[in-house]
Image (tube, grey):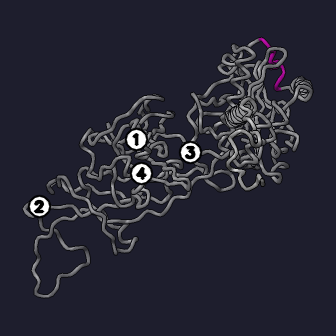
Amino acid sequence: MDRGLFRYEEPYGHGRPRRRTNYFAWAIAILLLTGLAFTAWLAGFYIIGQPERPDSYRILKKLHKVEPPKRFELTAAPPGEFLTATQLYERYSAMGAAELARTSSELTRNYIRNYQQVRGLVPYVVGRYTIMETRELGSSDIFADGMVALTISADRGELLMEHVYPAEPQVVPLMKQTLNVGLEIKLERTHDLSAVIHVERLVDGRLMITAIPLLYGTYTVTRGTGTFSLEPPMDLNLGAGWPVFKDATRRKAEIHFATYRQQSPAAKGNVPIPGLAPSGSPPPAENELVRVEQAVPLEAPKVAAVQPKIDNRSAKATPSPKGGKLAKNQKATPTPAIAQQLVTPSPAPIAMAAASTPKPTVAEPPRSTPAIKSPVVSALPVATPPERVAAAAPAQVEGALPALPAQPVPADSSGNALASIAGGGTWKTFAPGRMPLGRLIGTSDLKDLADRGVVGERVYLKGQFVVNFADANRAVLRPRSKLTDTVLHFGAGSSTRIIVDFPAGYTPPSQGSVVSRDEARPYEITEVRKQDDGQLNVFVREIMQ
């Protein structure tokens, strides 16, 4: 009998034995895969969370997950605090080794991330520092191009600072001629933003910080004609290690500087002793390294006519213009007095100097003419030639802002005007609710205003704002948004900065405070600038008494 014919009728189990599943091997494989996934997650968190490590930075750079350092503007810089040499030394000298290393890593991390995820305030350096030694940066340093200066504080001898100046290679020869030993570096809160990016404790107990200017501006010396400009570095070689001046190079620089101080007659008796604070304030330096900023060119003012509404009952007959004639068989009829005014856009707040062209003065109305109450202002084009308009003496409307006299523009030796960033202008202020008529908007309407511009109309701003930075006569505010608006990305949010100029004698609000402005006490908008990345810089001024 052929068994192949009835092979499916054989009883179950008499055929080929089945293989048993090895559950233990499968369990081991699943555990290995889980561990591999967990390890990859931890490695990703380690690399992304600590970009200041050389290996992490190198991997993120290849994956294009880290951007090169960018240039900040003075009004768009990250919020921070300005610390003197004594404050810096007292803060970091009190830290232990582990805490100091963690703080230093966080400072470097914030710089690599372009200060996008900062906890707290960024420390900025202010004060006077004397250059001990300078050298050119190379491929073996953290910053490849530019110069670095090793300095010592004029107020605290226990604090050293290495100030990095990244620049293009063609600028380095001029920088070598400018950054000389003994030159004093003066860092001020109104002009400089040199952020601390590393802190190192030396063997003898002194501290050495590394600072870099976030503005990357143009520098010159007070007794010199040459200027050089800085550029943000394109890449960082973190494998070179901190600090930039290593121990051997630093000790050699200190010996060279001590010899220079002994040979310099003006510096005898002023050699700082580690551990002993200098007595009295140091004398002013003969030559200083300062930052300069070119002024923004001002546009020519546009002429517009102001046509108020006038009650016909209060209108009086006015004589015809000088040299004009009446048409034949035409009688003289009472003509309402029309007040005209020159409406000029406010100058850029960064360049506080006004244009040098004199403005026409506004003549006061006659005593017999009744006052015009609550005029409705409308901007209309004027066909009159500029020379005839300048020669005319328009009447003054009650409640309108008077024309300000022109101020001279300071110029440097090369003929270029230097911008002043110190506030304190003079303009007319009003009681609450008594300002001239204008359009009132909120922070949500600023984007539309940036596209149209504010020339030819008076615009006021209301809302709640948080003070990020306050200076002598200037403050930088941000709109205060609700939690729901922040989560859902409604409104202007953090992409809007309000730069407020205060008149001379006003005290700006303190940093961190909340400012509320309504329709009775608004800000007057002078200019709105929109950057390529969508950032709005709104320049306003205080007009309330």
* Kind of residue indicated by mark 3: Ser
Span shown in magenta: 266-275
* Kind of residue indicated by mark 1: Asp
Q: Secondary structure at mark 3?
A: loop
Based on the displayed image, in which of its 4 quarters is residue 329 positioned? bottom left
* Kind of residue indicated by mark 2: Asp
Residue 524: image location, x then y, percent: 36, 47
Q: Which of the marked residues, 1 or 3, is nearer the chain's N terminus?
A: 3
Q: Nearer the viewer, residue 43 or 115?
A: 43
Mark 2 → mark 1, Cα distance in angstroms: 47 Å
Instruction: Provide the residue designation for mark 4.
Output: 526
The image's mark for residue 485 is 1
Q: Nearer the viewer, mark 2 or mark 1?
A: 1
Residue at 82% over, 19% down: 202
Mark 1 → mark 3, Cα distance in angstroms: 37 Å
Instruction: Provide the residue designation for mark 2.
Output: 311
Q: Secondary structure at mark 2?
A: loop
Q: Vertical placement of 471 versus 97: above or below?
A: below
The answer to whether residue 247 is left or right of residue 20 is: right
Q: Nearer the viewer, residue 438 or 490?
A: 490
Instruction: Provide the residue designation for mark 3.
Output: 420
Dot 1, crowdedness within 10 Å: few (<14), some or many (≥20)? few
* Kind of residue indicated by mark 4: Thr
